[in-house]
């Protein structure tokens, strides 16, 4: 059975002092052996700080983006080999905020996923529709187009990616997809993966978008929801820990 993965996406939040106290509180609240996977995707300047704190703990280190290039004249970019060098396990690619504010295309997101995998960093490939697209009945077509680009780029390594379904209208808005709405899209994504790899059953498909302590259990109980990508609620230790506990219960 797939393990659940609860990944915090801190976005552009935190400082040295608040990172340290957040992580200390989360670590203190965790059982010694947790029956789900946990990661925190942190701003790149804090990868070293957070990496030291989570070393030898159940929490894995994640980045929020990665370059499609390995090295060279790409000012401001951070490469997958650099992330690997810092013991980073996951990199979010194609988050809707990067698609929206940084013009990232499906093809570029695919290249980023490929670059991450080539360095042994697991890409968390984000897909999701806007409210307009949902209302126009385009949800399925949009997420399939986005995932198809990643599948195309990573070739035979499809089963090594993590997918995150994040409806754009649910991100940071307090509006969550219902468990049924989310499961329906996850099932579509699973079927698409199954057409590309015989190992689709092992791919974790996370839900993201206002997942919180109150709604996590219902979402995580769905057959194809294998975890969460958590923004706002990952910045509060009690909330993040509640979601981790919900994932443990859903795994039992
Ligand atoms: P949210 O963000 O939980 O604050 O809605 C999720 C995300 O953008 O990854």
Image: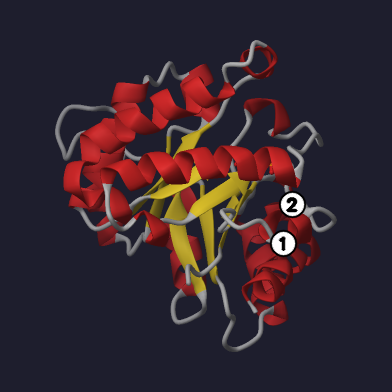
Q: CA distance from mark 1 to mark 2?
A: 6 Å
- Coordinates of residue 209 in the picture (x, y in percent): 68, 39
Q: Determine the image quadrant of residue 165.
A: top right
Q: Nearer the viewer, residue 28 or 4?
A: 4
- Ligand 1's quadrant is top right
Give the residue drawn at x 36%, y 59%. 88
- Considering the numbered disc 1 on the image, is that residue within a helix, a strand or a loop? helix
The C terminus is located in which quarter?
bottom right
Give the residue drawn at x 65%, y 19%. 134
**Could you say which disc has been placed on residue 233 in the image?**
2
> Which of marks 2 and 1 precedes in the sequence?
2
Would you say the residues marked 1 and 2 are in contact, meaning their CB atoms lie under 8 Å apart? yes
- Coordinates of residue 235 in the picture (x, y in percent): 71, 53
Q: Nearer the viewer, residue 42 or 122?
A: 122
- Coordinates of residue 108 in the picture (x, y in percent): 30, 25
Does the rendering let one see residue 79?
A: no
Give the residue drawn at x 18%, y 50%. 118
Whether the residue carrying mark 2 lies under 8 Å from ligand 1 is answered with yes
**Could you say which disc has been placed on residue 240 in the image?**
1
Does the rendering let one see residue 56?
A: yes
- Considering the numbered disc 2 on the image, is that residue within a helix, a strand or a loop? helix
Whether the residue carrying mark 1 lies under 8 Å from ligand 1 is answered with no
Q: Nearer the viewer, residue 99 or 140?
A: 140
Q: Against 56, is 244 above or below?
A: above
């Amino acid at each position: 059975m797939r393990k659940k993965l609860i990944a915090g996406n801190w976005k552009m939040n935190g400082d040295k002092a608040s990172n340290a106290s957040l992580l200390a509180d989360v670590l203190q609240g965790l059982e010694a052996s947790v029956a789900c996977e946990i990661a925190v995707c942190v701003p790149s300047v804090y990868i070293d700080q957070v990496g030291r704190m989570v070393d030898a703990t159940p929490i894995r280190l994640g980045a929020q983006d990665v370059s499609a290039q390995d090295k060279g004249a790409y000012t401001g970019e951070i490469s997958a080999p650099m992330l690997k060098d810092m013991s980073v396990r996951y990199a979010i690619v194609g988050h809707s905020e990067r698609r929206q504010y940084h013009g990232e295309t499906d093809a570029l997101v695919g290249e980023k996923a490929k670059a991450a995998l080539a360095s042994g960093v697991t890409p968390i490939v984000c897909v999701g529709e806007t409210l307009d697209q949902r209302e126009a009945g385009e949800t399925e077509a949009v997420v399939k187009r986005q995932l198809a680009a990643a599948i195309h780029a990573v070739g035979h390594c499809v089963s090594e990616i993590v997918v995150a379904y994040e409806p754009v209208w649910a991100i940071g808005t307090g509006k969550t997809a219902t468990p049924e709405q989310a499961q329906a899209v996850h099932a579509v994504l699973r079927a698409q993966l199954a057409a590309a790899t015989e190992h689709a059953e092992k791919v974790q498909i996370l839900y993201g978008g206002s997942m919180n302590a109150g709604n996590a259990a219902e979402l995580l109980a769905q057959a194809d929801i294998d975890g969460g990508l958590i923004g706002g609620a990952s910045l509060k230790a009690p909330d993040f820990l509640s979601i981790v506990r919900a994932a443990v219960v859903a795994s039992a």
